[in-house]
Amino acid sequence: MEDSSDLNVLLIYPKVPDTFWGFQHAIKFINKKAAYPPLGLLTVASLLPENWNLRLIDLNTSPLHSEDLIWADMAFISAMEIQKKNTDEILELCKKSGLKTVGGGPLFSNRYEDYLDKVDHLILNEAEILVPEFLNDLRKGIPEKVYSTNRFCDMEKSPIPKWDLLKMDDYVCMSIQVSRGCPFNCEFCNVTSLFGHRPRVKRVDQVIRELDELYRKNWRGRIFFVDDNFIGRKRFVKKELLPAIIEWRKDKKGIVFNTQVSINLSDDDELMELMVKAGFDSVFIGIESPEEESLKECNKKQNEERNLLQNIRHIQNMGLEVQAGFIVGFDNDPPDIFERQVRFIQKSGIVIAMVGILQAPEGTRLYNRLKKENRIIGEITGDNVDGSTNIIPKMGIDKLLNGYRFIMKNIYSVEAYYDRVKKFLKEFRPPKVYEQISMNRILGFLKANIRLGMLGKEKRYYWKTILWTLLYKPRLFPTAVTCAIFGYHFRQICRKNLGLDI
């Protein structure tokens, strides 16, 4: 393709299958099509020439038509491991149409050898470095097959995502990225191999400009800071970023934030107070296991020698809901790990508890260790809660799978789930920040009353929880309804993945 001027370019984001974090069953209550936008593709769009004609196709919100393929000169496709099936289907359609393709994102980076014959050009690492190199070669008429680098980009050079391409009303939440990388080095996690051990951050004014851009486009809902560890550069966050966000929010209404952090957040009351004041109301934390030896095995140093239940309670008392990830299948898991995980989750009051079987992504220290032990048996699916694994567990696969089903049944059965919701509502001290009440949210409540309160097997627990909240925690009424809707979604996932009748 010698002439790269005025190209028509498709930016294609493949469909995410029915998953725990997709919230497909929950978002239907509020008439949304997807939980999160394709932030990576929108960022890549801002790196492309201004004279190119761009069209975003997010298959989670709209179909890919043959007319789109005919219109386009080239397609950029970004995908995660879990999107592999639909990605392969899209590539086949592009090939049949004679459309040149450019692949990027974790799926292509982790499996680039599988796509050498399927994709015309592969961009395997950070787009801010490699997309300009690809564009320069394209202008010269000599684009290469594979673009790769061991360098990490300067986050201060990362552009504002091209939000104009997006129909925001289709989504529950918008996204912002402040940093890449994590100071910790958990054995099973590929964040450090992909993005580095030392978090790199954007300037404060960059972040504020991104917030301004979303607000200018009339976004008044939730914004997810997608950083793998938002507090990885704690001093920067405390002394520079959060004070600036607090100032920015003074004349803003309806904006609420959530993000991912490490458990050491609980050690810093000042940091939690600043986060709450800035508008954060929830955080996701990798708890992994109540078993100390399993934490040591996976190098989860930040979680070791702690009273994790006390830490979680403290964070929730400070006004931040804790959502958490748990893992079973470690070599050091004791025989009673499944019962212990259930007890821990129920005692914690963590409503959104993502429990997965240990998997070993390529590029992780866990993968390399288990490969030497001949314990790798395939590829990961990218779905944390589908009951699959690509390792041979020491406890035996049958015991692990049966134990996993035991956990999911005993934390997402109607009675257990609503017990946990009530415990959370009792202990949670909510911040004085609220998502804007919209007609969709009101309709969501009415739908919940019918689907959960009249037709669902949980109707008795639903109404008990709603009435208790109105009597004792009226400020948390919207939260209680949201929890009930999430519970419905999680039960559907358990039925689909594990065949559980709960």
Image (tube, grey):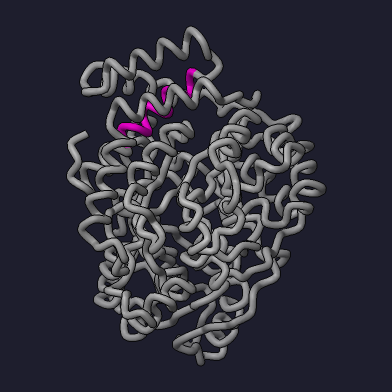
- Quadrant of the frame with the C terminus: top left
Q: Residue at x 40, y 46 (%)?
A: 354
Looking at the picture, how far across and down is residue 280, in whole percent?
63, 37
Is residue 151 in the magenta section?
no
Residue 62 in sight from this viewpoint: yes
434 relative position to 347: left or right: right
Give above or below for 180 relative to 205. below
Q: Residue furthest front?
A: 335
Question: Which residue is nearer to you in this view: 50 or 159?
Answer: 159
The image shows a total of numbered marks equal to 0
Q: Residue at x 60, y 42 (%)?
A: 217
Give above or below for 226 relative to 100. above
Question: Which residue is nearer to you in this view: 9 or 162?
Answer: 162
Residue 90 in sight from this viewpoint: no
Question: Which residue is nearer to you in this view: 21 or 97?
Answer: 21
Question: Which residue is nearer to you in this view: 301 or 500?
Answer: 301
Q: Quadrant of residue 156?
A: bottom right
Q: Residue furthest right?
A: 239
Main secondary structure along the magenta-highlighted residues: helix
Q: Residue at x 27, y 18 (%)?
A: 459
Q: Residue at x 28, y 73 (%)?
A: 378
Looking at the picture, how far across and down is residue 237, in whole percent?
74, 49
Is residue 479 in the magenta section?
yes
Looking at the picture, how far across and down is residue 229, in whole percent?
61, 54
Looking at the picture, how far across and down is residue 406, in whole percent?
26, 43
Q: Which residues are magenta?
A: 477-489
